[in-house]
Image (tube, rainbow, N blue to C red):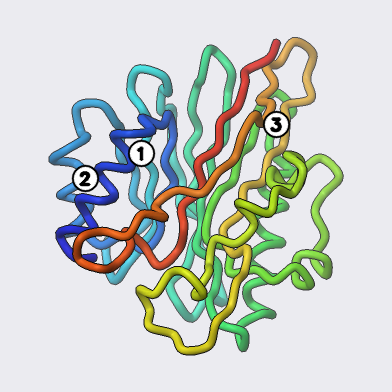
Amino acid sequence: MQPERARGLCSCLTSHSPDVVFLQELIHLYVRSLKKRFAGDYTFIEAGKEHYFTGMMLKKSRITLLDSEIVSYPDSQMLRNLLIAQVLFKGQKLHLMTSHLESCQENAVERMRQLRLVMKRMRDAPDDVIVLFGGDTNLMDCEVAEVGLPSSVSDVWEQLGEQEACRYTWDTQTNTNKGIRSKCRFRFDRLYLRQASSDGALQLDPDHMSLTGMEMLDCGRYTSDHWGIYCTFSAVC
């Protein structure tokens, strides 16, 4: 990521001031840059130390980190894993999850294997816990259909009415960062939600979803080759 693109990310985070940030393809140089800017307000969790990796930022004034875990994908050829943070929000337990699933069409079998692991962890979380997953899944709709979502897990984009304006997070028709000649659009980045089912537990109801990072920077590139997802929720007793 170029310095101007890093500044674009910082500007986006400052503008939205999110409670939780799921980050993909981090490298240590830019983790240091983010920490220098936001360490006073956010707790940082990283899922790796080499190559590139995922991470989270949790707003200290709103989210209390209890524990975190990195779950390896045993057959990944790309060092991919699942990062899980156990947190408290308004007294409610949440498991926050992010992952960058195996890339490329030829790795569909491994990607679906990873999705099954994610769904199992979401389904098997304790009944008094809300689970929210967000990440770069690289998934095609047919792959999701083949794996299937547990009945307790919802796709947040679908839950909000499948708005066309925020369908495609990988869009080489508009985003020219990769310089790809073929023009393609996919919904690679997804949010999945499993509500707590125990009596008296808080519920997170999705309110709004939009794409972010769509402004071209002065350097002629975008902050990322993916559009980001900005999503808001209401906490309901």
| Secondary structure of the residue carrying numbered label 1 | strand
Quick one: label 2 or label 1, which is nearer the N terminus?
Answer: 2
Q: Which residue is mark 2?
A: 34
Q: Are marks 2 and 1 in contact (CB under 8 Å)?
A: yes
Q: CA distance from mark 2 to mark 1?
A: 10 Å
Q: Is residue 123 left or right of residue 229?
A: right
- Between 1 and 29, the one lying in front of the other is 1
Disc with the residue nearer the chain's start (3 vs 2)? 2
Q: Position of residue 115 (x, y in %)?
A: 67, 62
The amino acid sitting under disc 3 is Pro
Amino acid tagged 2: Leu
Q: 60 or 178: nearer the eye? A: 178
Mark 3 Cα within 10 Å, few/some/many (few <14, many 20+)? Answer: some
Occupied quadrant, residue 20: top left
Residue 102 image offset from top left, x and y in percent: 54, 73
Question: How far is mark 3 from mark 1, CA to CA?
Answer: 23 Å
Secondary structure of the residue carrying numbered label 3: loop
Q: Which mark is residue 66?
A: none
Q: Quadrant of residue 27?
A: bottom left
**x, y (%) of residue 79?**
43, 72
Amino acid of disc 1: Met
**Residue 142 placement, left or right of 33:** right
Disc 2 element: helix
The residue under the point 66% across, 25% down is 204
Vertical position of residue 143 compared to residue 100: above or below: below
Q: Which residue is mark 3?
A: 126
